[in-house]
Amino acid sequence: MQYRRLGRSGLQISELSLGSWVTYHNQVDVAAAREMLAAAMDAGVNFFDNAEAYAVGKSETVMGEAIKALKWPRLNYVVSTKFFWGLDREGQSVNRKDTLNRKYLMQAIDGSLKRMGLDFIDLVYCHRSDPNTPIEETVWAMSDMISRGKALYWGTSEWSADDIRAAWNIAERHHLHKPVMEQPQYHLFHRKRVEQEYKRLYEDIGLGLTTWSPLASGLLTGKYRNGIPAGSRGALEGMGFLVKGLTDAARNAAVTQLEAVATELDCSLSQLAIAWAARNPRVSTVITGASNLAQLQDNLGAVKVLPQLTPELMARIDLISSPLAS
């Protein structure tokens, strides 16, 4: 496992990391989480991604209890959370969901710290942008979160390049803690934001990337070529919004072509897709997900594929996937 700087910060994170979206609490309990976290750490992974909204807070609890049981030295691992959607999804408390206002953010961090059993969280993200809160208010709140020792770095997830630049400029003007990283979706069929929209930000402000969904929610495993199998992510309650993309005929045909490339490299299709995302030098880490140990170990095998992705092979992969990319 290699380690990369998170943008221009001095923080070093593993090129592959482990996230908890969908799996923790829903498919992975504390015992399974402990087993997979330990295996990931043994393989060199040091970054573990989470969010307040995952399993309505229960994902943070599962990860926190697993980490506590493992008794890792705090310097050895990096954890994250994200704020925006809140926990009060069905209630009427307008300042507890779909917002980045100061009141919500300053209380949300305390809830995450309690659920994860930590004194501070390393990386905190604004999970989406909030058109109803001035960016300046959000920047001040996130900077204060760091100044109070509750977080070490802050960033954004799925923000536009213009909003990221605006936040950075506000922080620069007021000598506040600047956003360090962005967490965008990035895979073979979803590329334009990372490769085009953010292009100027890498040099201008030193933006780092912790990318998610390298397997396109499972499409790039090949298991959706004949529909939605029982027990898969696409079959889970609340995941119906993924079905159209997972069963797209043109993309599944491209997956078959990509599988032939993987066979030539003697790797799995998943390993090829993860290695492709990690091959981008702008990516600080690729967040992987797993519902069992075997899946985790297969995903982490992508580190052995990375050196095989020559410019010629990358061009071949692009010919297959880029015409279908958004």
Image: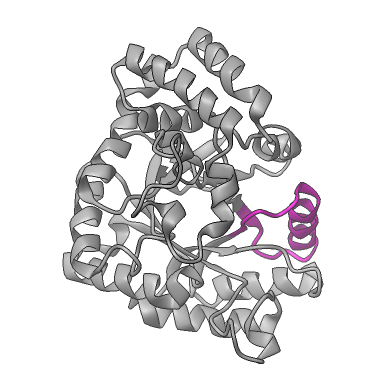
Left or right of 313 in this view: 169: right
Q: Is residue 267 visible?
A: yes
* Residue visible at 64% across and 24% down in the picture: 322
Q: Give the extent of the magenta segment.
A: 155-180
Q: Is residue 172 found inside the magenta-colored segment of the image?
A: yes
Q: Quadrant of the C terminus?
A: top right
Outermost residue, bottom side? 92
Q: Is residue 14 above or below residue 266?
A: below
Q: Which colour scheme is used?
A: one colour
* In the displayed structure image, the side of residue 140 where residue 125 appears, left or right: left
**Residue 208 left/right relative to 166:** left
Residue 271 part of the magenta-drawn span:
no
Residue placed at 60% from the left, 28% from the top?
Answer: 250
Query: Looking at the figure, which quarter contains the N terminus?
Result: top left
For residue 294, which quarter of the picture? top left
Q: Where is residue 105 in the image (x, y as percent from the top left)?
A: 61, 79
- In which quadrant of the rendered view does residue 42 lie? top left
Q: Is residue 86 above or below residue 256?
A: below
Residue located at (28% from left, 17% from top) = 266
Q: Can residue 118 be seen in this view?
A: no
Residue furthest to the front in view is 226
The total of numbered circles placed on residues is 0
Residue 6 as seen in the image, left or right of residue 159: left
Nearest the viewer among 106 and 316 is 316
Q: Residue at x 28, y 63 (%)?
A: 28
Picture coordinates of residue 256 (x, y %)?
A: 45, 22
Whole-percent x, y for residue 241 in the image = 58, 57
